[in-house]
Structures are given as C-alpha cells and as structure tokens.
Image (cartoon, rainbow, N blue to C red):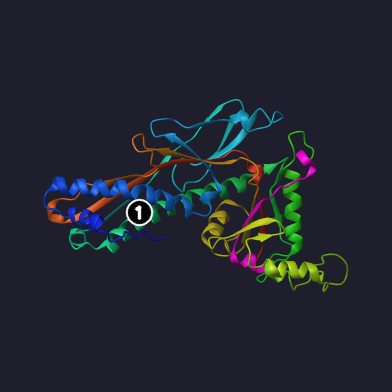
Amino acid sequence: MKITLKKTEEQVELVKAMASRNRDVAYEAQMALAEFISPVLVKVINQAPVISNLFNNFSFNEMDSPSLPLDLYYDITAPEYVKVYSTSVPGGLPTNTVVPTVSEMKFTTYRLDSAVDFDKRYAAKSRMDVVGKTFTRIAQEVLLKMEATSQSLLLGALQAAQTNGDDHFVAAKNTGPDASLILDDFNKLLTKAKRINTAWTGSAPEGGRIKGITDLIMSPEMIKGLREMAYNPVNTKGTSTDIAATDSMRDGIYNNAGTPEFFGISIMEINELGPEQKMTKAFAALQTGFEVDDDLAIGLDRSRESLFRAVATDAENGSELNLVADDQYSVRQSKIGYFGSMEEGRMILDDRVLTGIKVDHQ
C-alpha cells in the first residue's frame, strides 16, 4: 500500500501553504488537501483488506441508526429465535445475541480512527514523499483495525457455530508435527458443509446442487498440503497406503497449485493462519482442545447473504472516511497533523455459512 502525491505545480503550492505562518491560510490548505485525499484513502482502504472484503457493504447516513429486517434473511421455517453475531468495539470479542426473526436487528457501530503528524519544515520544502507517507499511515492503521475486527468476528462465530447439535468442524485425518491436509479432509469438509446448507424445506436447494462452500481461507502450510496431493498417496481405506491419485487428477492438482482455486472453490491464502500465527492463537483462546501450534482452514459459503458491514457516510460529502486537520498543535510545536475516522458495524446473521478443518499437530 502506497499513497503517492504527484509533484504538480498546484499540489506543490498547496503543500507549501500548509506551512504558512498565517494560521488561516495554513488551516485552509490542510483542509483542502484532506478533502482531496479522503476519497483516495477510502478506495485504498476498501480494496486492500482480505478478510474485511468478505463482508457485504451497505451505507447509512452518519446521523442514522443502521438495522436489518431479520425476517427477510431467514427462511419461513426458521426457529422463532435466532443467533446473531456482532462486535461492540474494534477487535473485541464477538457477542452472540438471541433475537426474534421478526425483529429489526440494530447494528452496533464503532469508530476506527488514526492520528498522524509531521514537521512543518517538510511541507515548507514540498516534501511530497513525507506527506504521502503520512496519509499511507492513516490508511494502514484504519485497515489493520478493520482486519482485526473482521477476524475476531469470523473466528468467534465459527467457534460457536452449531447445526442440529453438531459443530461445523471436521478433524484432519493426519495428526502430528508433520501433519498436513489431504484430499480426504477436503472431501469431508465438503460433505459437512452440504449437510449444513440445505434448502428451507430441509431438502436439496434449487437446481438440486448443494454448494456449501464457495471459498476456503487457508494458511501457507495448508496450501502446501494441497500441492502435496499431486504426489502423495490419496487412499484412506484398505491395507495398502501407497495408492496415488490418477494421472489426470494429479495433473489437475499440480496445475492448479499456483492458482486461487481448487476443485471449483476459491482459495484465499493468508499469513495470519498457521501454527503460532495471529488468528490461530486467537482461535486457540476460544476453542477448547485447539492449541496454538495447530492449524485451521475456514470454509465460507458466500452464496448466502450472511456477513454484513454497515459503514457511515458523511452527510456533506458522502465520504466514508472523515479526514480533518488536527488542530491540537501550537505554533511552538511546528507540527502539521491529520485525524481520520471511519464508523462501521459488522454482523454475521447465519453461522451456517462457516465451516472448518482442524489439523492437530500434537
């Protein structure tokens, strides 16, 4: 991620004006730059995330209270009360709220913010690189908070998810320090997801095809397991343990190893998953029997509308990011500061969209 300001004559003069001794001139220049750069930062923030982009966005006026009519998102045979997952603070522990399906579910919103500053002399010397780095830092900090909140909500909902008294996990066949994903694990997860994702009548969905999983979020170690399927044995029954996949299957696995798709399912590779990694540690704190050196693959059905993000827009300019000149600095400090904030709320309406594979490395 990098914000670069072009060194045009107009922008150079604008940046120089930010260091003016005339406070009114300096503040006006700072606000003019904020209005110019704010839409750019919003585009960067919305395009750069990984987990955050799994949520469906809808906007609301910053003075309104966003909500969703639950009866439109649950089928007619749904129970009278349902569980909805949300967070009240950025990166906080998800809350499981039991509400009637006929109710209007209010979003709990929170503020993601960032404050940065730099020395006035950089503006006086038209150091566009320093000014650009300043706005890059704002985007990075807001982005990190968005990702942390999205990850916490996803993991919390997955840990608590149950359908008909059964959790949404399958255990990998192989265990131990060198355990990795095999084709049988992948197959079991697809079957688990299909049993969870039925039509509202309990039968097969429209068209007779049960999807269940559209995306898999995996660690680099899990992706390694996918590549190994091209040359490792695949059989799980019988006395022989050295039966390989067919040549055509092994060729298909090998050829797809570098693409973000596996047997028609999109693969999302992230560094936050894997033994001793950020999301793994967070999940270990939630799930009994899951250790920090284990691994986790998360299945997601994006064909269902379940993951939502409500984001506030400014009533004056319609921007999602409120970027203003920070006026806390005195003349003696010789600083120029900016304060950016974004108000949002996230919610998971249906935990049936979430499944997972646990790989035990003990």
Residue, x 31% and y 48% (percent of image)?
36
Part of the protein shown in magenta: 206-225
Q: Picture quarter containing residue 274? A: bottom right
- The residue under label 1 is which amino acid type? Ile
Q: Quadrant of the N terminus?
A: bottom left
Dot 1: element: helix
Residue 268 located left or right of residue 58: right
Q: Residue 19 in the image: state x and y as whole percent.
A: 17, 55
Where residue 196 sits in the image (x, y, percent)?
Answer: 72, 44
Please provide percent x and percent y for residue 324: 28, 45
| In-image side of 18 versus 179 (left or right) | left
Viewer-side residue, 12 vs 152 = 12
Residue 217 among magenta residues? yes
Observer-nearest residue: 201 or 98?
A: 201
Confirm whether the magenta stretch covers residue 228: no
Please tell me which residue is depicted at 15% across the width and 50% down the height of the picture. Answer: 330
- Name the residue at the front extreme: 9
Label 1 environment density (alpha carbons within 10 Å; few <14, some 14–19, many ≥20): many
Relative to 354, is 24 on the left or the right?
Answer: left
Residue at which label 1 appears: 138
